[in-house]
Amino acid sequence: MGIQVKPGKILINNEWTESLSGKRFDVINPATEEKLTDCAEGDKKDIERAVLAARRAFESGAWKKMSARERGRILNRAAQLLEKHRHEIAELETLNNGKPISETLHVDLPLAIETFEYYSGLADKIHGETIPVNGPFLNYTLREPAGVVGQIIPWNFPLLMAAWKLGPALATGCTVVLKPAEQTPLSALRLGELLIEAGLPAGVLNIVTGFGPTAGAALAQHMDVDKVAFTGSTGVGKMVMKMASETNLKRVSLELGGKAPNIIFADSDLDAAVNGALRGIFFNQGEVCCAGSRLFVEKSVHDEFLSKLKTKAEKLVVGNPLDPKTQMGAQVSEEQFKKILSYVEQGKKEGAKVITGGTPAQNKGYFIKPTVLEGVTNQMTVAREEIFGPVVCALSFTNTEDLIHQANDTIYGLSAGIWTRDIGKAHRFAKEVKAGTVWINCYNQFDAASPFGGFKQSGFGRELGEHALELYTQVKSVWVSLD
Ligand code: NAI
Ligand code: MG
C-alpha cells in the first residue's frame, strides 16, 4: 500500500511524450474526490502522430512478419509482468476507479493476466484453410491482420478492457492506437510500460489519453485506421459507427450497454439465487454492462426473496476501496454518482418503492448504498434505461408464458440470467432469450476463452475466445492454377 502515482503521458513509438498542445487534465480519486494526478490531454493532432506511428510499424512488418510464436512469447511476458506487479497495479486501479481492492486484486488483475496468457497461446494458431473448389485449382485462404486498429475503452474495468482489446489485436499482428477513458487512464499507461518491457517493437502500441469528442472522435474518423473497436455507451457507439461510415468505412465492433433480465423461479435454490442477484447487480458498484439490473422474481417467492435480498444488501461493506474488507467502493465520477441518484428519484416518481438504499453512503466520495427498487414494471424508465450503478429493479411475475417476451422487451441484449432447478426450462430460456451471454444458476462469470458481446443495441462482434480473432483479421482467398 502507498504506491507513487505518476503523472500520465502519451505513448507513441515506445516513447512517452506530452500532448502537442501541452494541455493536461486532472485525474480524480472518486473515493476522496481529490486529485490523484494529471495526464496529458491528447487531441486530434496527437491521434495523427499515433496513427502514423502505428501505420509505419504495421507496414514495416516488424510485428506482423515476426514469427507468430515470438509474438505470443511477448504477450506471455506481458502476462508475467502483470503478475509480478499485480499488487501495485491493483492499487493503482482502485485509486483511480474507486472499485474495492479485493476486486482489483482477485478479479480485474487475474482476468487481465489470463487474457494475455490466452492470446499468447493463440498467436501461432491463427491460420487459413484449403477449400475443395471445382476445376484444376488449389484454393486456400490467408488470415491476415486487419491493419491499424483504433480502440476506445471505458472506465468501469480500465485494465481489463485494455487487455480484452489488446490481447487479440496484438496476437493477430495488428498495430494499435488505444484511447483510454478520461476518468481512468492510469492502468492502461502502466500496461503500456509493461508491454514495452516485454519486447513490443516501437509503434505497435500507441496510447493517447484524452477526451472522447476530441481524441476519441479523431480516432473513429481517421482515414488511415482500418478498424475501430469501441466499448461504452450505446449513444457514442452509434456515433462511432457513423463516423466510420462517413470517412473510410473502417470496420467497426461495438460492445455497448445492457439491461439484463435476471430471472428467479420459485423452484430455484433460493439462497444461491439471492447471492447471484447480489453479485449480479452490486459487483463493481453496478458499473457493469452485463449487470443483472432487471430482477424478475416469481410471485410465490417474491416477498421471501426480496426480504433476504434486502438483508444481505444492507450487510454489504461499502466504503474505503483500499480496505481489503470492503465489498463496494465508490462510483467512478460525480457525473455517474448524480446520474444514478436521479434514476432512483425517477423510479420513485413512476411508482417504484425503495426498500433499501437509494442515498449516498458517505459524506465524501461518490459512494451510494446498495439499492433495491420494488414494484417496478417493465415500462418504467428505471427498467428501460441503463442506470449503471448499484440499483436493482425488482419485478414480480406469475405468467411464465409472458416471461420471455418481457425479458426480451428491451433495446439491449448483452446478457441474461436464470435461476431454476428445472433444466428443460433453463435451456429453453437460454435458447429464446436475445442475449450474447446467458448464465444459468450463476452470474457474472467470465473466462478469456468464452466469447462476450451483444445482440440488438448492445452492439455486435464478439470479444474474447477465438471469436475475437475475427474482429482483427481479414480473410484472403488465393487461387492457384494446377494446369
Ligand atoms: P462514453 O460512451 O461517453 O465513454 C466511453 C469511451 O468513449 C471513453 O473512452 C470516452 O472518452 C469515449 N467517447 C466519448 N465520446 C466520444 C466520441 N464522441 N467519439 C469517440 N469516443 C468518445 O460513456 P460515459 O459518458 O463515460 O458513460 C455514460 C454511460 O454509458 C454510463 O452511464 C453507462 O450507462 C454507459 N457505459 C457503458 C459501458 C459498457 O461497458 N458498455 C462502459 C461505460 C459507460
Ligand atoms: Mg459520454
Image (cartoon, rainbow, N blue to C red):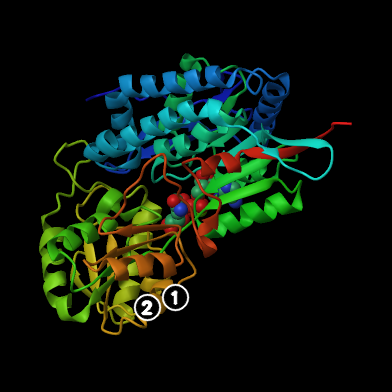
| Residue annotated with mark 1 | 409
Answer yes or no: disc 1 within 8 Å of ligand 1.
no
Q: Does 347 sit above or below residue 197? A: below
Picture residue at 46% right of the left edge, 27% below the top:
121
- Secondary structure type for disc 1: loop
Q: Quadrant of residue 272?
A: bottom left
- Separation (CA) of disc 2 from disc 1: 8 Å
For badge 1, the amino acid type reads Asp
Residue 76 percent coordinates (x, y) = 43, 21
Q: Does 304 sit above or below residue 248? A: below
| Residue annotated with mark 2 | 378
Tag 2: Cα neighbours inside 10 Å, few (<14), some, or many (≥20)?
some
The residue nearer to you, when weighing 301 against 24, is 301
- Secondary structure type for disc 2: loop
Quadrant of the rendering where the N terminus is positioned = top left
Q: Does 177 sit above or below residue 342? A: above
The residue nearer to you, when weighing 135 against 365, is 135
For badge 2, the amino acid type reads Asn
Picture residue at 31% right of the left edge, 69% below the top:
424
Residue 294 percent coordinates (x, y) = 33, 68
Residue 146 percent coordinates (x, y) = 67, 36
Picture residue at 44% right of the left edge, 26% below the top:
191
Tag nearer the camera, 2 or 1: 1
Residue 89 percent coordinates (x, y) = 33, 27
